[in-house]
Image (spheres, helix red, strand yellow):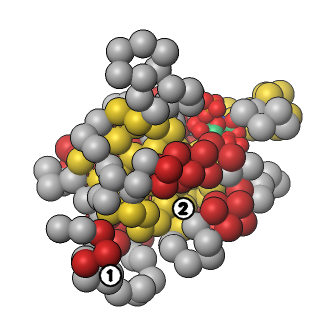
């Protein structure tokens, strides 16, 4: 079926179970949040870092995030879940493990230099309803990069999701990249992990 012919998905607010969200924040606080002096992807320095992969690449967080993302995908009518490697990889895989109707896509940071020379790995996403995901949003550049690359590939975007938003201005950039029309949801923010923290 062509993308234009699909039924529109109702623009209802996204909802995820509060107890699952709270448990995710607890796991991230206990096992992923570290303090020190760190250089971030944006080049900015920060006094804390959230190593989401340490938590997401093991149970129970893999299953928990998989079911939360699959639920958001269901509410948005997404057929595929993916984003920029490496942050999106466990999230996309967890979502298809939670809901076998979903497929995943992984966006490279640069096109592969041999073989098929692809930017995006996985089943084709042209004309496919896609939810773009990310583990951490700081400046938002990585999530925006994935959004733009998926669009360039012909994906029909339905929204974006982050496991953790550091509340450092990324939301605004992501919302702008979604033309202010599609939803952006952070499952947790730094305030859930440490209310005392500034971005
Ligand atoms: O919102 P931003 O300012 O773009 O920062 C967040 C990005 O930083 C981290 O990835 P990183 O760039 O460290 O690369 P990796 O996924 O290859 O480890 C994280 O997984 C996000 O992708
Ligand atoms: O901005 C980043 O690079 C970043 C911050 C953070 O807390 N965790 C992470 O994986 N990346």
Judge the density around disc 1: few (<14), some (14-19), many (≥20) Cα neighbours within 10 Å.
few
Q: Residue at x 21, y 53 (%)?
A: 102
Between 190 and 147, the residue placed more toward the observer is: 147
Judge the density around disc 2: few (<14), some (14-19), many (≥20) Cα neighbours within 10 Å.
some
**Is residue 134 something that shows in the picture?**
no
Which is nearer the N-term, disc 2 or disc 1? Answer: 1
Q: Where 179 falls versus 125 (above or below)? A: below
Name the side, left or right, on which 44 lies relative to 123.
Answer: right
Quadrant where the N terminus sits is bottom left
Between 75 and 61, the residue placed more toward the observer is: 75
Residue 128 place in picture, x, y as percent: 30, 58
Residue 94 place in picture, x, y as percent: 29, 43
Residue at which label 1 appears: 9
Ligand 2 in which quarter: top right
Q: Where 124 falls versus 157 (above or below)? A: above
* Count of numbered badges drawn on the protein: 2
Q: Where 39 falls versus 74 (above or below)? A: above
Q: Residue at x 35, y 41 (%)?
A: 105
Q: Residue at x 32, y 49 (%)?
A: 125
Residue 99 place in picture, x, y as percent: 18, 54
**Is residue 164 something that shows in the picture?**
yes
Residue 122: image quadrant is top left
Residue at which label 2 appears: 186
């Amino acid at each position: 079926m062509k993308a234009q012919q699909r039924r529109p998905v109702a623009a209802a607010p996204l909802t995820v179970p509060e107890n699952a969200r709270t448990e995710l924040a607890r796991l991230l606080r206990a096992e992923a949040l570290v303090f020190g002096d760190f250089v971030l992807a944006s080049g900015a320095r920060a006094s804390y870092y959230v190593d989401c992969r340490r938590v997401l690449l093991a149970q129970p967080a893999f299953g928990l995030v998989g079911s939360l993302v699959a639920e958001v995908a269901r509410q948005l009518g997404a057929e595929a879940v993916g984003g920029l490697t490496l942050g999106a990889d466990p999230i996309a895989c967890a979502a298809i493990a939670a809901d076998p109707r979903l497929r995943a896509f992984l966006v490279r940071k640069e096109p592969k230099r041999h073989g098929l020379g692809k930017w995006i790995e996985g089943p084709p996403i042209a004309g496919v309803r896609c939810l773009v995901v990310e583990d951490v949003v700081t400046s938002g550049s990585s999530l925006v990069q994935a959004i733009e690359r998926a669009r360039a590939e012909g994906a029909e975007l339905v929204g974006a999701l982050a496991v953790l938003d550091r509340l450092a201005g990324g939301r605004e950039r992501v919302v702008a990249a979604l033309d202010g029309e599609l939803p952006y949801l952070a499952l947790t923010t730094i305030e859930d992990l440490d209310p005392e923290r500034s971005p």
